[in-house]
Amino acid sequence: MARRREIGGLSGDTLPQLFWNGVQARGESVMFREKDLGIWRAMTWAQAGEQVKHTGLGLVSLGFEPGECACILSNTNKEWVVADLGILGAAGVSAGIYPTDAEAQVEFLLNDSGSKTLFVEGEEQLDKALAVRERTPHLKRIVVFDMEGLRDFADPMVMSFAELRAAGKEFERSHPEVWEQRIAVRRPDDLAILVYTSGTTGPPKGAMISHRNIVFQCREGAKLLPTYEGDNRLAFLPLCHVAERVIGLYYAIYTGTISNFAESPETVPENAREIAPDAMGAVPRIWEKFYSAVNIALQDATPLQKWAYRLAIGVGYRVADRKIARQPVPLGLRLLDRLGYWLVLKNIRKGIGIDRCRWLVTGAAPISPELIRWYLALGCDMLEVYGQTENTGLATIMAPGEIKPGTVGKCVPYGEMRVSPEGELLIRGEHVFMGYYNDPEKTAETIKDGWLHTGDLGEIDAEGYVRVTDRMKDVIITAGGKNVTPSEIENQLKFSPYITDAVVIGDRRKYLTCLVMIDHENVVKFAQDRNVPFTNFASLCRAKEVNDLIGEEVEKVNRNFARVEGIKKFRLIDRQLTPEDEELTPTMKLKRKLVSEKYAPLIDSMYATEKAG
């Protein structure tokens, strides 16, 4: 059956209205898929609608009031979405908590939001909630999605998700009119969701996003890229993050795209191969890992396979460079490119799950222009976007066929952007948030005369392309007075298959240094292939061969920069970090300020001879 273009098929001024109209219009169409016992199982819009309604009415039966906030502490799954939409449908405010957050962070977010209800995924997250409940006086009930391991557990504050929905179903029998009444309660300018920032420079701030912000972003943003009802997407980024929450989930609700929930972050490549999504958005770290996996696999390829890849990708690069330069691709080169695709590159694209993708989107952090060029060489349009929680996710976008690596595209047509005299990017439009919860002073600093002050340095060229150079607070001024934007150097370092992340140091110092987080899987393979002895991650990082390897990667990057911008020394972070570690954000980015403080002795060791020098 032909699929229709979906650029505005749902009416409604609030997210609950939008969703419920989708349930009425798409009843038996698939809304979600989730893998269970090795099989992808579907949930229709009608089934999801029933679960959402009974979740919301279950909350109402327990005294949930319009405007009340509830939190969700879980990995990305369909229960998260059902709880979120149930809270909103009951006229409430929904806030997410990263599943990797420690107890202290859970305590802070529960207290800051004033939440009386907390949804948790299972036993691990329940333990966090129980540990802080004595210090969270607002908290009245905890709802558990998965009761595995909790069969004999009993606590008056705790109930299962199934019990909550059962209470809602029972409540509906005697109050059949309440659900649609609650949906009608909230107005477009009312608060819909709180999205807490990562808190890299202090306590997390709750960004207040209204129903108008979300519906406006969905309606206008969905017009920018070809999206069809029934398209498949892979959902795997944290739903606490504005990218997955708005640009992923809420866009999917609006367009009728099917959300397929990955089993875990580690299974994303496998799940992408199984689902074969029609479009895919991810953070740079995912795209870097795909690229690294291909390059590492090539090391074990036969000489013939390596030769074929070099030929095919070489032709792909020639085509990519012509597209970037806006030059026509000659017929002969196009034919060679198609031949290379069918004989070689198609298998590579299928291997990382992107062969059916009409476009790829990257955002939430800077990406190396060379990585975009590689995906273009594969025949995939990789579109870099830019935005913040504070502008409901999307502020710029790269149009297909108009790719300009090194920029983040042009301002979305439904917003405005300009550069302040200080070089700061400013944004204005209906997608700009309401402000920070419980923090009017920070709100006044961030929104001035209707303009959102992003905190990012940037420029807009004559064609309207936006280039983000760095965070204002991250710019390095060396002892010699040279201004250095570290993100440019770090992005090129991360293009290496052996480097996961890097933090450039050098503010008020004579030269630049760098802390490097190695790619564990790829460096282990490097060491094993060369019989380098190691016993654990720390000993791997101390191995001379590994340090020489990273040194070579650093030198490759240094050749692209002026001498004053080159990395003179580096050190490897010899702990294998996960999102549970305070040095990393939930989206796997190193926290510059915290890393600089925590690894101060390691940093100082690189400047031990600075005075003498």
Image (cartoon, grey):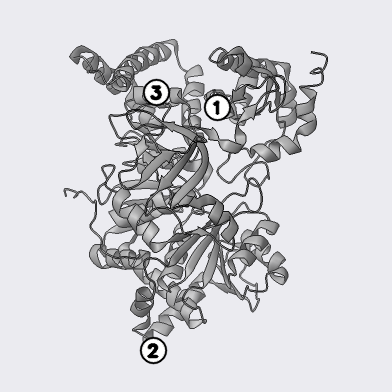
Q: Residue 392, image x and y in percent?
A: 43, 52
Name which residue type carries label 2.
Ser
Q: Is residue 224 above or below residue 466?
A: below
Q: In this view, does 390 lie to the left or right of 613?
A: left
Name the disc covering residue 174, or none. 2
The residue at 40%/23% (across/down) is 374
Estimate the spatial distance between the alpha carbons at disc 2 and disc 1, rounded to whole Å: 59 Å
Q: Residue 145, image x and y in percent?
A: 53, 65
Name which residue type carries label 3.
Arg
Say what secondary structure mark 1 lies in. Answer: helix
Q: In this view, does 232 lie above or below 105?
A: above
Q: Which residue does the numbered mark 3 point to in the structure image?
A: 373
Name which residue type carries label 1.
Lys
Say what secondary structure mark 3 lies in. Answer: helix
Say what secondary structure mark 2 lies in. Answer: helix
Name the disc covering residue 494, or none. 1
User: Tags 3 and 1 in contact by the CB under 8 Å rule?
Assistant: no
The residue at 28%/42% (across/down) is 225
Q: Which of marks 2 and 1 is nearer the N terminus?
A: 2
Q: Is residue 557 left or right of residue 226?
A: right
Q: Is residue 83 above or below residue 159?
A: above
